[in-house]
């Protein structure tokens, strides 16, 4: 795909925006969420400006994005690409930073209001933490941050009076259902799951599943890691843990229901038995847009759900015997401490190995389970202990790849 096609709009600059714009930093701008967020911004240049863009390796897209939006900073974590980007942006006012330290330095820059945390995986944790300590509003796509160290993140957000606005569609749905309900306790939340491409399949089928088949999601186009997590149902497990922290819930208040059409994005049940649902077509631009415009709703031209067309919305129980990742994630949720961090690290290693065709689809669950049994449990970890547990879990999970 050409860079221009990937950008999906004509290059434009945000120079000349008025002082009332929300200044946005997009961490992970070259990914699925990152590129969609730039489409959202491009449609509302009177309301938003782009101050920071970051990428891991895709320097060509990062350069094209920087030339289009003229941010104050770009960061490339792959330091080998630094010179290429520096040269390409030499005629602009954009400063180029590199490496993990570059991400941390950019996160603490004073000239932005909202960080869109759209880096995938554990790598998103440290810059997000830095943005919270710098008092920035967080539009949170990166669920792994809360899975790894949810207690520390939420406490820091409280200490620094920082708002965390979820971008994950289910959590955005719940967040939207809770507007105006501040004094009404939640009885439970119902997280909807599409079930992924292997809904209804059994282990005898899954054992032979290959990367390319698992990457075909029926309803959403997303980055590779979350697409595999959706196929194994680990994504929903991570989302249960994410929901616990975002909405201060007990594990038994979180229910998962399979809803293959992905029209109801999630629901909240209140103490009087009333259930509120947030609905819409499956399009991540909507929760991204809402996180940027919150608490307002601003007109968009996104396609609308049409009740005049024949539609059937269905719901069923997840098959947790086949998709055991959901059971493992529930175990981690119940156990707490560093267990979700261990689960997440092992899963990242296992999914990466599956994407490289080094392990089978069912091995992902096996690797996560064995790592959870192996790495020492810590009930109340410090931040350093989370970092350490993450490292230990990665080393152990990687040692299972040759099994
Ligand atoms: P992606 O793989 O498409 O993009 C990831 C981005 O992170 C890229 O910009 C990449 O350059 C950057 N990145 C990757 N590894 C990095 C590293 N080690 N250091 C720094 N940057 C790194 O992923 P995505 O699908 O856009 O998902 C991003 C996050 O949003 C994930 O946490 C995912 O769970 C969450 N999320 C995504 C969707 C979706 O529809 N894609 C929906 C809900 C939640
Ligand atoms: Mg989701």
Image (cartoon, rainbow, N blue to C red):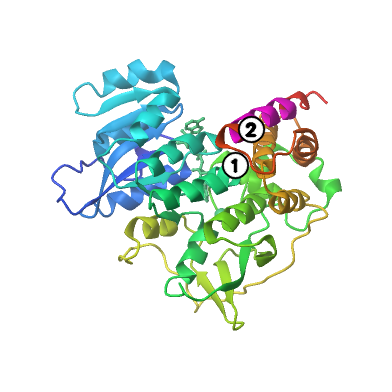
Please state if 153 lies on the left or on the right of 180 as rendered: right
**Image quarter in which the N terminus is found:** top left
Residue at the right extreme, as displayed: 204
Image position, residue 338 (x, y; %):
66, 41
Quickly name the residue at label 2.
390
Label 2 Cα crowd, 10 Å radius (few <14 / some 14-19 / many 20+): many
Image position, residue 236 (x, y; %):
65, 54
Image position, residue 347 (x, y; %):
68, 38
- Whether residue 184 is visible here, answered yes or no, is yes
Image position, residue 299 (x, y; %):
30, 66
**Image quarter in which the C terminus is found:** top right
Check whether the beta carbons of the residues at disc 1 and disc 2 lie within 8 A of each other. yes
Give the camera-side residue of 215 and 22. 22
Whole-angstrom CA distance, mark 1 to mark 2, is 8 Å
**Circle 1: element type:** helix
Residue under the point 50% across and 65% down: 173
Residue under the point 42% across and 18% down: 79
Whether residue 370 is situated above or below residue 220 in the rendered picture: above
Q: Which mark is residue 174?
A: none
Please state if 40 lies on the left or on the right of 190 as rendered: left
Disc nearer the start of the sequence (1/2): 1
Residue under the point 49% across and 37% down: 124
Q: Is mark 1 within 8 Å of ligand 1?
A: no
Whether residue 233 is situated above or below residue 62 in the rendered picture: below
Give the camera-side residue of 206 and 132. 132
- Whether residue 358 is visible here, answered yes or no, is no
Quickly name the residue at label 1.
148
Q: Which residues are magenta?
A: 386-397
Q: Is residue 153 magenta?
A: no
């Amino acid at each position: 795909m050409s860079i221009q096609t990937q950008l999906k709009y004509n290059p434009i600059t945000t120079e000349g925006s008025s002082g009332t714009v929300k200044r946005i930093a997009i961490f992970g701008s070259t990914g699925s969420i990152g590129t969609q967020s730039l489409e959202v911004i491009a449609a509302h240049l009177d309301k938003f400006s782009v101050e920071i863009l970051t990428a891991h390796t895709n320097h060509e897209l990062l350069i094209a994005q920087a030339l289009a939006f003229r941010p104050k900073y770009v960061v490339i974590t792959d330091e080998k690409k630094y010179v290429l980007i520096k040269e390409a942006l030499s005629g602009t006012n954009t400063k180029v930073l590199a490496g993990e330290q570059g991400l941390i330095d950019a996160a603490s820059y004073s000239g932005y209001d909202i960080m869109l945390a759209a880096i995938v995986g554990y790598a998103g944790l440290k810059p997000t933490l830095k943005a919270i300590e710098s008092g920035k509003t967080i539009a949170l796509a990166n669920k792994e941050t809360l899975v790894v160290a949810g207690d520390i993140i939420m406490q820091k957000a409280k200490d620094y009076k920082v708002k965390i606005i979820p971008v994950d569609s289910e959590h955005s749905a719940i967040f939207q259902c809770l507007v105006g309900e501040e004094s009404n306790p939640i009885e439970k939340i119902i997280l909807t799951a599409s079930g992924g491409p292997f809904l209804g399949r059994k282990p005898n089928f899954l054992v032979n599943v290959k990367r390319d088949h698992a990457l075909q999601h029926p309803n959403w186009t997303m980055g590779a890691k979350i697409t595999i997590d959706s196929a194994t149902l680990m994504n929903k497990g991570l989302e249960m843990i994410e929901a616990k922290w975002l909405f201060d819930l007990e594990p038994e208040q979180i229910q998962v229901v399979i809803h293959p059409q992905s029209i109801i994005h999630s629901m909240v049940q209140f103490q009087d038995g009333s259930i509120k649902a947030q609905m819409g077509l499956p399009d991540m631009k909507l929760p991204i847009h809402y996180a940027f415009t919150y608490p307002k709703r601003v007109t968009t031209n996104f396609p609308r759900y049409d009740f005049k067309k024949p539609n059937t919305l269905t719901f069923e129980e997840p098959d947790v015997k086949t998709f055991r990742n959901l059971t493992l994630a529930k175990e981690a949720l119940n156990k707490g401490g560093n267990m979700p961090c261990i689960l997440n690290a092992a899963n990242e290693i296992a999914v990466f190995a599956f994407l490289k065709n080094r392990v089978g689809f069912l091995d992902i669950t096996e690797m996560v389970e064995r790592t959870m049994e192996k790495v020492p449990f810590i009930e109340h970890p410090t931040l350093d202990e989370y970092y350490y547990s993450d490292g230990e879990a990665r080393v152990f999970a990687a040692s299972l790849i040759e099994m």
